[in-house]
Image (spheres, helix red, strand yellow):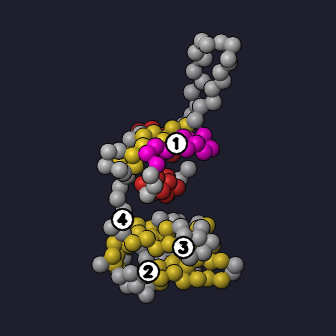
Amino acid sequence: MKIQEIREIIKLVDGSSIEEFSYEFEGVKVKMKKSGSGKAQQISSSPVEATQTSKASEAPSAPAPAKEPKAEELVSQEAPEILVSDDSEYHKILSPMVGTFYESPSPDEAPYVQAGTKVSADQVVCIVEAMKLFNEIEAEVDGEIAEILVKDGQLVEYGQPLFLVKAN
């Protein structure tokens, strides 16, 4: 599970009336619970371990053998409680379509923008290729690129955030 996917889940939980949320996917378990302030906190993010229980026996089962954690699990285990950062001060440039994200007009040219680049509303910041058509994506606001959320050549979904822009 990617950090961006976790961020999207946190935003959905924050915007809902749900007080507690638990999610398991591909061996990773994420639990979130809203704090008193109404903001979601990530309670834990850990690998799911399969345990077998028998109704005939009430004795606790032996712990599963330890497995080698993945790099992303190590990060989440080092800091199991994470307060959600508020990125509402940033404008999100969203992908208008499903396609492939390109940061430059061609492989041998410099990227359109980098973190820290000042942009104007009509400035091209990337290209999303869909069905052999190269669609130029504009900044939409005047400001500064705070973060690039996807990598060059990555597949993107409709509505997926591509950039965070600190608007002027």
Dots 2 and 4: beta carbons under 8 Å?
no
Q: Secondary structure at mark 1?
A: strand
Q: Which residue in the protein does label 4 denote?
A: 88
Is there a contact, CB below 8 Å, between mark 1 and mark 4?
no
Label 2: which secondary element:
loop
Q: Mark 1 or mark 2: which is in front?
A: 1
Crowding at dot 4, Cα within 10 Å, few <14 / some 14-19 / many 20+, comes out as: few
SS of the residue at dot 3?
loop
The residue located at (54%, 83%) in the rendering is 136
* Disc 1: which residue: 22
In the rendered image, the quadrant that contains the C terminus is bottom left
Q: Earlier in the sequence, mark 3 or mark 2?
A: 3
Q: Which residue is mark 3?
A: 95
Closer-to-camera residue (138/42): 42
Residue at 35% over, 50% down: 38
Q: Which residues are magenta?
A: 18-30
The quarter of the picture where residue 123 lies is bottom left
**N-terminal-most mark, 1 or 4:** 1
